[in-house]
Amino acid sequence: MNTPPKSLFFNLAASTVAAFVVSGPVLAADVSVTRLETPAPSNSSLSRVVADESGRIYLSWVNHSEEVASLVFSQLTDDKWSEPQTVSQGDDWFFNWADFPMLSVNQGNKTAHWLKMSAEGNYDYDIEAKFFDSGHQGWSEPRIIHNDGVSAEHGFVSMLPVGAGRTLISWLDGRNTKSGESHSAMTLRAGVFDSTGLTIDEWELDSRVCECCQTSSAMTAAGPIVVYRNRSDEEIRDIYFTRYVNGAWTAPQAVHNDDWRIAGCPVNGPAVAARDDQVAVSWFTAKDDTPAVKLALSDDGGMSYSEPVPVAGPHTIGRVGVAILKSGRVVVSWLDTERDGTHIMLSLFTQDGEFVSSTEVAATSASRRSGFPVIVETDESVYVTWTDISEAPQVNVARVDF
């Protein structure tokens, strides 16, 4: 876990894989997968794992009981989960298989968000959040993090601690799709909030982005980076990034020009991880109807990237994650559909992007109800969480030691 740069405390007010074919994953023999007993009950889903600055692991998920949903979390200590704590609950929440609540933890401070219906439209919902200030030992009252007051889509959130008890929150914002003489595009926005939920600053990062692909963010040695799926006037929907440097956000740039033209949103966002100046971005693309998972690496804090490294294809549906181990090796998570059923895979690469091996974590389902597996690293291990829908929805967790 990395310490954010001091400037943020004070200034923040290989080649393309479109046609490559993989005959099957090279399975690792020296990687162990340990299933952990989950603190989540039956009828649980939408889970995430996060780590704090000391490498402590937290699991968050949503419990469903009749008409009421509850956002709950637990901390892992010596492979044992703490008593689950409820952050918030409601009977007016919005649920989307790809757009779900998140917890962020740093230096005892916590930020949690969920989605709440704002009007009768199918996609009219707000991002609501609560903030836990370790100095006051209590959660704030819930608040809507955006101030546009427009009943529209707001979601696909990523959250990132940026020091001094502050949290960077980035999200897709649909305010412009409901306003003006001619409705405009989905935008990417971000804001910084203190430990009590006060807005320190807010920006529009990109004025036209893909409508429902996840955002992702990470802290480099120079400052935060946000990655997302862009949308051009010609419906090219490639992966872009923007960085916060010297008090301002850089102009959006492509991680790589896949030139994937698609008329609708693929609901398959990118993932980014950073360790000092090392940055890794993974993503899904399907140009020419050829599905592929790619990885691009940077050694200059995310300013420039290598040519994409092939991770998987064409028997994949993406749903990626990425992590950088303490050694600098990179792990990409993805869903494999080549063999019978669907499988959660972790592929390991050297710091220079050389493929090492792939490991199967668990069988899963390609159904949207299974959601997106989420990974986070600590030292040379990766924690994975996903939803098993073979019976009643059930959150699962595994630790993979490399």
Image (cartoon, helix red, strand yellow):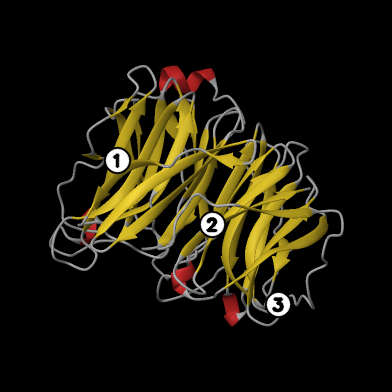
Instruction: List x then y, in percent, for residue 259.
Output: 55, 68
Neighbourhood count class around disc 2 (C-alpha, 10 Å): few under 14, some 14–19, many 20 upward: many
Residue at 57% in and 48% down: 272
Instruction: List x then y, in percent, for residue 22.
Output: 77, 75
Q: Are marks 3 and 2 in contact (CB under 8 Å)?
A: no
Q: Earlier in the sequence, mark 3 or mark 2?
A: 3
- The residue that disc 1 covers is 129
Q: Which mark is residue 19?
A: 3
Residue 214 vs 234, above or below: the answer is above
Say which of marks 1 and 2 sits in front: 1
Say which of marks 3 and 1 sits in front: 1
Res. 206 visible in picture: no
Q: Is residue 201 left or right of residue 107?
A: left
From the viewer's side, name the closer residue of 40 and 96.
40
Instruction: Tell me the SS state at disc 2.
Output: loop
- The residue that disc 2 covers is 270
Residue 211 vs 399, above or below: the answer is below
- Find the distance from the CA under tag 1 to the CA under tag 2: 23 Å
Q: Amino acid at mark 2?
A: Pro
Q: Which mark is residue 12?
A: none
Q: Amino acid at mark 1?
A: Ala
Q: Amino acid at mark 3?
A: Ala
Residue at 47% in and 41% down: 74
